[in-house]
């Protein structure tokens, strides 16, 4: 921008000072200076347009690089999740097959096949664990379970519960002493 201003100054100075008064008539010299200034102005405008386009292209280039990096990160994350899920399916299937042998229950084998076919391994394993009884057997779950809300405790109920708890503690102490 400084070059353009310097060029315009030199043109003006050269047109007015450097030329003799006899060579330039007033209106002819002024029109030459005016056309030179217009040429410098259009050149400066063109230069600024090219410079702005260049800056915009560089910004777009950086944006494309950033979007590419984000896309690569998402692909890597999706691949890692897919590998984790595949490994989880293999382990869950193996565990469910072993549970089928140990508990003699074919539902575990069906769950293992379902997981192999694309079923959710977390759901299958949690369902299998919910069927295992604490004594080592398999729970027989009813088709429909009916749950009742907890009864509202009144003061007399709380007193009865406290009395039962203290009686239970007393019986545990007497068993330990004997």
Image: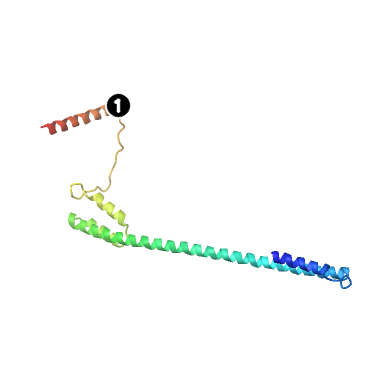
Which of the 4 image quarters holds residue 100? bottom left
Image quadrant holding the N terminus, namely bottom right
Instruction: Report which residue position mark 1 lands on.
Output: 155
Return the residue nearer the eye: 130 or 69. 69
Residue 97 is left or right of residue 42, and the answer is left
**Which residue is at the front of the view, 14 or 108?**
14
Q: Is residue 66 visible?
A: yes
**Residue 168 falls in image quadrant:** top left
Q: Position of residue 79 (x, y in %)?
A: 38, 63
> Residue 63 placed where, x, y %?
53, 63
> Foreground: 120 or 107?
120
State left or right for residue 33 relative to residue 131: right
In the displayed structure image, the side of residue 20 where residue 148 appears, left or right: left
Residue 120 % position (x, y): 32, 57
Q: Quadrant of the C terminus?
A: top left
Is label 1 in a helix, a strand or a loop? helix
């Amino acid at each position: 921008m400084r070059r353009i201003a310097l060029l315009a100054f030199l043109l003006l100075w050269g047109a007015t000072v450097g030329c003799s008064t006899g060579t330039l008539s007033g209106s002819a010299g002024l029109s030459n200076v005016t056309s030179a200034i217009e040429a410098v102005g259009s050149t400066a405008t063109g230069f600024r347009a090219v410079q702005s386009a260049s800056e915009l292209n560089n910004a777009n280039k950086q944006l494309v690089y950033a979007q590419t990096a984000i896309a690569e990160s998402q692909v890597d994350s999706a691949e890692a999740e897919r590998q984790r899920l595949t490994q989880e399916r293999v382990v869950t299937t193996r565990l469910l097959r072993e549970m089928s042998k140990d508990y003699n229950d074919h539902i575990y084998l069906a769950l293992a096949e379902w997981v192999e076919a694309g079923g959710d391994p977390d759901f299958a394993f949690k369902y299998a664990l919910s069927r295992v009884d604490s004594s080592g057997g398999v729970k027989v779950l009813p088709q429909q379970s009916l749950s009742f809300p907890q009864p509202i405790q009144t003061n007399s109920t709380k007193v009865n519960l406290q009395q039962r708890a203290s009686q239970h503690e007393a019986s545990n102490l007497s068993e330990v002493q004997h």
